[in-house]
Amino acid sequence: MKIFLILVICISIFYLGVCFSKYYKKKLIFFNNLLNFCEILESQIQFKKITINQIIVENLNLFDFEFKQFLNEYYLKNNYNYSCMFLNSNENLIVKNFFKSLGKFDVKGEINNLKNQQNLLKIKQAEINDKNNKIGVLGTKLGSLCAILVFIILI
Amino acid sequence: MLKDILPEKVFNGVSEIDQNLLNEIRLRNNRPIVVNVSGKNFYLNEYGVSTNPQDALKCDGGFINEIIRKVSNNSLYSINDQLINGYISYDGGIRIGVAGEIVSEHNEISTVKNINSLNIRIPHIVKNCSLNCYPLIVQNGQVNSTLIISSPGAGKTTFLRDLTMQISKRNLSVNILVADERGEISGGNNLVLGDNVDVYLNSTKQYAFENGIRSLKPDVIVTDEINLENDLEVIENALTCGVKVIATIHAKNIFDLKLKKNFSNILNNQMFTRFVVLNSNCGPGTVEGIYNQNLNCIYC
């Protein structure tokens, strides 16, 4: 019974570490998806001139779950209060401002706007990537180490 | 359809009107909203129509912006080419006329800003409205090149759409090409015109005629609102290729048509062999007369 409890505690600590690193990974994947979306928008707007809604619907399956859910709730269902739990308020604001800036210009203006937005998003992506490499990876390692330490102490 | 594009307050009023009789909704910035019902104009209020401007719904800038946003689906670039030409086509053949401030760049119009007037025209399908004229337009399976003439709002497009449907329904071997410049004939390609109908949507007449003849081998080309100065050449070219043309033109009657520049070319070359004149005396689409290539009345 004691060993079982110790194992549960250790696994929980390890899991916490994994979750911590996943938090950063999710952010990174979200911003990678957002940048991919920018490129899709750029090419589709220039080529087909179809609406943003149509572009989203046609390409929804290309994205990961969280970004897909965001597109669905925020843009397609017009639920403007929707926020991603794993993004902080500043990051949520950046993403929402990006979507608010869409669809207000002619093709030339829209492409220029997308390029500007892409530059801003790339800066944010680099920042998150940096944090992910520094802190995110550490989370799994720290979780494993703590789990082993707790196991040794408690056994 | 209207629910998707109108602000809630406006839609509430419009929904009280018989949709079969509603022709137009006119929104002008800071002015009362006006609707055209059965050819007559009324003010719109929250409970339907009114003759009193005091209780009419007033259009604020927000209404117009909301409609533009909804029609473009939050993607202004997707309708900018239409805006430049002064209209927006919407699903179901709804056409929205636009007036505002023109923005130019290098002597070319780049967009329209500060839009202050909208005219939302609601199309109607009047089944079999062209049936009376059909035997004079299609004889022994051969379609006569036909020009449909009327002043704006007298049912040209409705007549043209029904005529296309009738020809398609009765003559499977006749391939019809619809050059739908503004999406009105085919309702933005949402209406089923027939099993042997191809549609060029939002294309210029020149593109549709030239490429259509080359690639789709139509027997009849149907198009709306021709301009005798710009479109005559492509129509002439189609006719010399053996393709029949059914088109519409703005004119009050055959006498007004004669005054138009280049009309003598049409007559001398016998480009059209039938002229259908419509008026709205007994409601839009009333046939005033049908004339042959010599402008002799064959149906009055």
Image (tube, coloured by chain):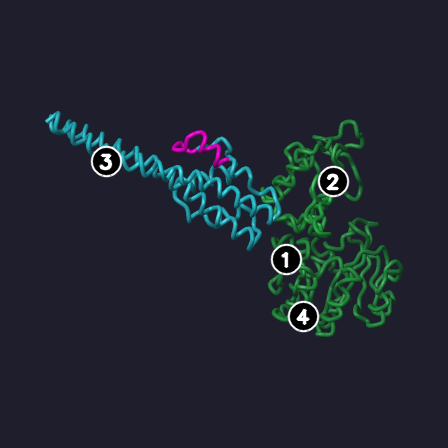
> Which mark identifies residue A141?
3
B42 or A68: nearer the viewer:
A68
Q: Is residue A148 left or right of residue B16?
A: left
Q: Earlier in the sequence, mark 2 or mark 4?
A: 2
| Comparing labels 3 and 2, the label whose residue is closer to the camera | 3
| Comparing labels 3 and 4, the label whose residue is closer to the camera | 3
Q: Earlier in the sequence, mark 1 or mark 4?
A: 1
Whether callout 1 and callout 2 share a subunit is answered: yes
Residue B101 appears in the picture as rendered: yes
Quarter holding the N terminus of chain B? top right
Secondary structure mainly formed by the magenta segment: helix
Residue for badge 2: B117
Residue for badge 1: B201
> Which mark identifies residue B219?
4
Q: Is residue A154 left or right of residue A37?
A: left
Q: Is residue B290 left or right of residue B20?
A: right
Of helix, strand and loop, which one carries label 1?
strand
Relative vertical location of residue B89 with respect to residue A131 in this rendering, above or below = below
Badge 1 density bin: few <14, some 14–19, many ≥20, Cα 10 Å: some
The residues tagged by marks 1 and 2 sit, at their Cα atoms, a distance apart of 25 Å
Whether callout 2 and callout 4 share a subunit is answered: yes
Colour representing chain B: green
| Comparing labels 1 and 3, the label whose residue is closer to the camera | 3
The residues tagged by marks 3 and 2 sit, at their Cα atoms, a distance apart of 64 Å
x and y percentages locating residue B84 in the rendered image = 70, 49
x and y percentages locating residue A7 in the rendered image = 15, 30
A49 in the magenta segment: no
